[in-house]
Structures are given as structure tokens and as C-alpha cells.
Image (cartoon, helix red, strand yellow):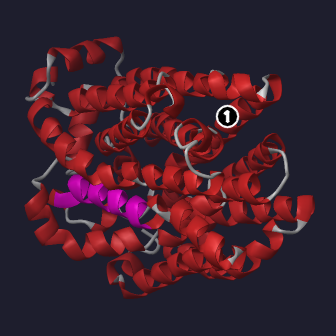
Amino acid sequence: MSAQAAAPNSTSMEQDARDLHDHGGTPATIAIGVIIGRISEFFDFFVYAIASVIVFPALVFPFVDRLTGTIYSFAIFALAFMARPVGSLIFMAVDERYGRGVKLTIALFLLGGSTAAIAFMPGYQTIGIWAVALLALFRAGQGVALGGTWDGLSSLLSLNAPENRRGWYAMMPQVGAPIALLVVSALFAFFIDALSVEDFLGWGWRYPFFVAFAINVVALFARLRIVVTPEFEELFKTRDLQPSAVIPTVRREGRTIVIGAFAPLASFALFHMVTVFPLSWIALFTRESIQHFLVIEMIGSVVGILAIVASGFIADQTGRRTLLGATAVAIAVFSVAAPLLLTGGDLGEVAFMVIGFMLLGLSFGQSSGVVASSFSPQSRYTGSALTSDLAWMFGAGFAPLAALLLTSHFGLAASGVYLLSGAVCTLVALYINKELAGADRA
């Protein structure tokens, strides 16, 4: 089969990528592309998330107190999740017209460019309110770009995996998140330790953003070497993973999209409650060293990696729906105990992070494993992308802001309410989603 026959919309850029390498369509090969892609996406995410707590309140919002500045920073943090569905709509059209390789190239350069632009951004003391506008613009750019990074590989991995190993392969894309957090936390901890406060806020915080751009470039070539080969073009077609029109897809699959978006809310809400929010609590309401807590976060990341891997084994034995339901109940319990642990000193903080990341890994590891199989073949690619966008927006985008607002007005115990609501949404979604129940061991 010629490259032209495999991909009638291909461009010369995609042809060049094909010439670089030629892969077979094995699940292991797909997994490599998925993991690399997720690491790059989450690296950008965590670089911004940590900076939104320890940099932007002082750099961009020095005209208000630190708590208010962090609230403003978290409000801009949510912009990416609101812009992500818009990016999906834009890049679905690019995909359909110019091909998946062109879409990925534009999206990843936009993601890396938006992230690198933040690194060059002057502070409020230099350009005034324009610093706020630029931060919001670049953050929205990250969100639009993330909507375009959907390459269908995770859905292809789930559908192409051996029947008795789908839980194992479903967890592989999720490993990228704690790996990225581990590296980002280490970078920030190093610069905080090595530099004075003035130097760190002046220029040291910018280096992790440059690293993020470099990782995006590497990820781009790694993913292009996979998704634009003739074998994978054909595999995407045989699995019906081609873009479909958004409005007809929503009309056909609206119920599945909504249920699929609500099913992982427990893990997505917990995602920020153990990564971003506790860092803001430490920075605002304690005298503890940020560097010290970043080290604890690195320990939690390792626990998260191990728990995600374990989720693959457990899901293949018990079923993914059973695992998601059990972890949602455990997250509901954790939402009550979490504030007590976070205020329990060093041991309490370590326990909070270890237990939180363990539950996060078990739930997050399978949170998107069954989405693709729930859609009709003609809607699978677009439906999976929209479901992922909505799940992140409702489950994670506003979590740090909601938790910090609740904490500042009603105390730390109130932050567990948001997490509890996510667990309830997951349990309700799993209960009413009969398709998901039928695919329990699929």
C-alpha cells in the first residue's frame, strides 16, 4: 500500500515523517507513542500549575495580597480547561482537511510556544496590567493547543489491546502524569534551593518552561514517527478512528459523552487536590518550606506511578467499572480524612500525599480506559476527544480554585466537599451507564 493510498489527505510534511521511520501496529508500539505524548502534555500542565502557586501571585498580582493573588492565578489556571474544547473543534477541522500529522505539529508547537512565551513574560512591575492579560492569553493558548494534541493513540491502544489485558494497556497513557510531576517538582525544588528568592522570582522560575518547550519538540517527532506511517493510518481506519463532524456526533452520542465525562470525575477532582491545591495550602497557610513539600510531592508521584501500574493488574481481574466504583467510594472517605491529614504536620502531610496518590493512581489509571469502546464506530474518534475535554474541564479545571475559595471562607475541612462531589458524580455515572457496565471486562 502506498503512502498516498493510506492517507489521501497527507501532506509533504507527513510524507517526510513516514520516511523517517516505519513501525508495525503492535500495542507496545502504540503504548510508546501514548506515554511520550502524555508526558509532554502533563509536563506543560505541571510547570504552569506549580508556578501558579509560587511565582505568579508575586510576579503578576503583586497589587493584591498573596491569597487573593493565588485565587486570581487559579482563575487563569482554569482558562486552559475552558479553551480546550474550543481547540478540539478547531483542530478536528484541521485533522479532517490536512491530516493528523499537520494537526499534531501545529498543536504541539502552539502548546510549546505558549509555554515558552510565559517564560519570557515581564511581570506587573514592568508592564502593569498587561502582565495579567498576557498570562491569560498564553494560558488560553495552552488550552487550545491541548485540544489539538488528541491523536487517537490512547483509543487505538485500548481497542487494539488483547482482550484479557485491556486494563493493563488502559493504564499506560496515564503513567505520563506522575512522571511529569516528578520531574517538574524536582526542577522547581532545585532552583528554589540553589537561588535566592530574588533570583528565583527574577529568572530561575523560567527555566522549567524552556525545558517544557524542548520536551514538546521531542514528543512531536516521536509521535509523528508513529501516527503518520501507512500501517497506522490503516489501523486508524479499520478501527474507525477518523474525525467525524462535531454536531452530528453530539446528536448521536450526547448521552455517552456526558456519562463518559462524569464517570472519571472522582479521579480528576482528586488529581488537583493532591498536586496543586496542597501546595497552595502550604504556601499560604503554613510556614513550611515550599522546597520541602515539593520533595514530598515527588514521593507521592512515585507512589502514583506504582498505583497506576497496579490498576492495570487489578482491572484485568475485577473489571474496570468495579475498580472505578471502589476507588470512588475510597475517595469519598478520603475527602473527609484529607483535611485532618494535611494539618497533621510532616507525618500527616506525607500520609496525605501517599494515600492520595495511591487512590489517584488506582482510579486515574483506568479513568479513560473504556471511553472509546462505548461509542459507535463512526463517532469513536471525535466522541472520545470531546469526552476527555469535558471531563477535564468539569472534574479538574476548577478544582484548585474551588478548594482554595472554600478553604479561605470556611476552613480546610470545606475543601473536601469538592472532592466528595466528584466521587458522588462518578458513582452516579457508573450506575446509570449500562454500556459501561456491559463493557466491564471488555
Location of residue 268 in the rendering, given as x and y in whole percent from the top left corner: 51, 63
Residue type for callout 1 = Val
Location of residue 157 in the rendering, given as x and y in whole percent from the top left corner: 40, 48
- The magenta-colored residue range is 379-394
- The quadrant the N terminus occupies is top left
For the residue labelled by badge 1, is the local secondary structure a helix, a strand or a loop? helix
- From the viewer's perspective, tell me whether residue 203 is left or right of residue 384: right
Total numbered badges shown on the rendered structure: 1
Residue 36 lies, with reference to residue 442, above or below; the image says: above
Residue 303 lies, with reference to residue 358, above or below; the image says: above
**Which residue, given by chain and number where applicable, does mark 1 sit on?**
183
Location of residue 391 in the rendering, given as x and y in whole percent from the top left corner: 39, 64
Q: Is residue 16 visible?
A: yes
Towards the viewer: 414 or 237: 414
User: Dot 1 surroundings within 10 Å: few (below 14), some, or many (20 or more)?
Assistant: some
Towards the viewer: 111 or 197: 197
